[in-house]
Image (cartoon, rainbow, N blue to C red):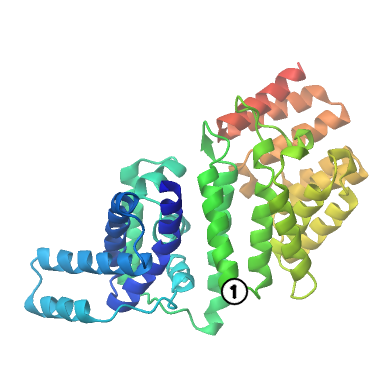
Amino acid sequence: METRIEDRLRELAPQVLGALVRRHGQFDACEDAVQEALLAAAQQWPVQGLPDNPRSWLVTVASRRLVDTWRAEGARRRREETAAALELRPEPGPEQDDTLALLFMCCHPALSVPSQLALTLRAVGGLTTVEIARAFMVPEATMAQRISRAKDRIRSSSVGLDLPPEPERADRLRVVMHVLYLVFNEGYTTSSGPALQRADLTIEAIRLTRMLHQIMPGDGEVAGLLALMLLTDARRAARSTADGQLVPLAEQQRDLWNKGYVEEGVDLLTRTLGTVPVGPYQLQAAIAAVHDEAPSAEETDWPQILALYEVLEQVSPGPIVTLNRAVAVAMVHGPRAGLALLGTLDDDERMEQTHRLEAVRAHLLELVGDLAAARESYLRAAKMTHSLPEQRQLRLRAARLS
């Protein structure tokens, strides 16, 4: 019962916030009022049962909290009159759903990427400040300040709830998708700390992306992003052992993969590829599908993966794409060819922020037979990552080569 209520509250949170912001403005005050209404619902609904119209219940409670706050702050008579008038306004119809507009607002380019992440999870995802702080391994006070600054920036920038005009919409949609992609990635492989993954974040990213796809079913890249998440998260149960050790893709028990997610992801791609211009999320999803559909690691169609990476590098070039293409090159043309391509990244400053270059280099050096050099690269990679499971796995591989 409580799990069902929690899921329902997270589903309704952005709809309620969108309704309040559209009626009252003042995003920051409305967001606080919605959080109080969600808390009240979490306390009352398990005891009293779900109301006939949960959305209307939340909108009503949040509106009253908003009005009470204004009055408690000793607002001037004009504000009191405004509040009284707002109380008398009819509730918005259930067909009014401003979730997409709210996503665009939270991902406004006036905000930094960390602020976009935090505000999206708080306002659209319905996560508490404590949950968001725990997910990104920062103190609650730090995350509270980040969210507060983001709301202040929204207010000072006079960002409205309406969708951006058509010329800006494509760029803003890219920001929205990028934020959801970052949330998923942080959940799938946490950047620091003792846990390999945060299922709550991956589940939330999939839920929000599924919502975005429902609102924009004709957008190929939105479908591609959802497919990518499903095809990737399908492997979650096989990615670690019972004691938390990381299991590389080639060594995973494929019967543990979520076949439902694989089928849904492949179906999304099948319905999308070839019907709309191809984009980076669709291409990444296609690569994930090739991996997921292979009966075993040995039967993976690496030439097809390499061809997809070559297209991806043309559509969306970057060092991470080159890094992944180097792995595919090694699997098709041999590890020395892969190492030669990796060498083109040695002077790229962007790769100084990740351990992945050294980790891939170590793997390819091991395949070549240069075990001493491979061991050193594994150890360097272990020093560069803040993820404890990744550190253990890299050091274990180094130890095996001693």
* 356 relative position to 142: left or right: right
Image x and y of residue 364, in percent? 81, 35
* Residue in the picture at 66% in, 66% down: 223
* 313 relative position to 242: left or right: right
Residue 23, above or below 111? below
Q: Say whether residue 125 is visible.
A: no
* 218 relative position to 331: left or right: left
* Residue in the picture at 71% in, 30% down: 377
Quadrant where the C terminus is found in the figure: top right
* 114 relative position to 170: left or right: left
Task: Return the residue at label 1.
Answer: 216
Residue 164, above or below 127? below
Q: Say whether residue 342 is visible.
A: yes
* Residue in the picture at 41% in, 65% down: 14
Q: Nearer the viewer, residue 182 or 362?
A: 182
Q: Residue type at mark 1: give it.
A: Met
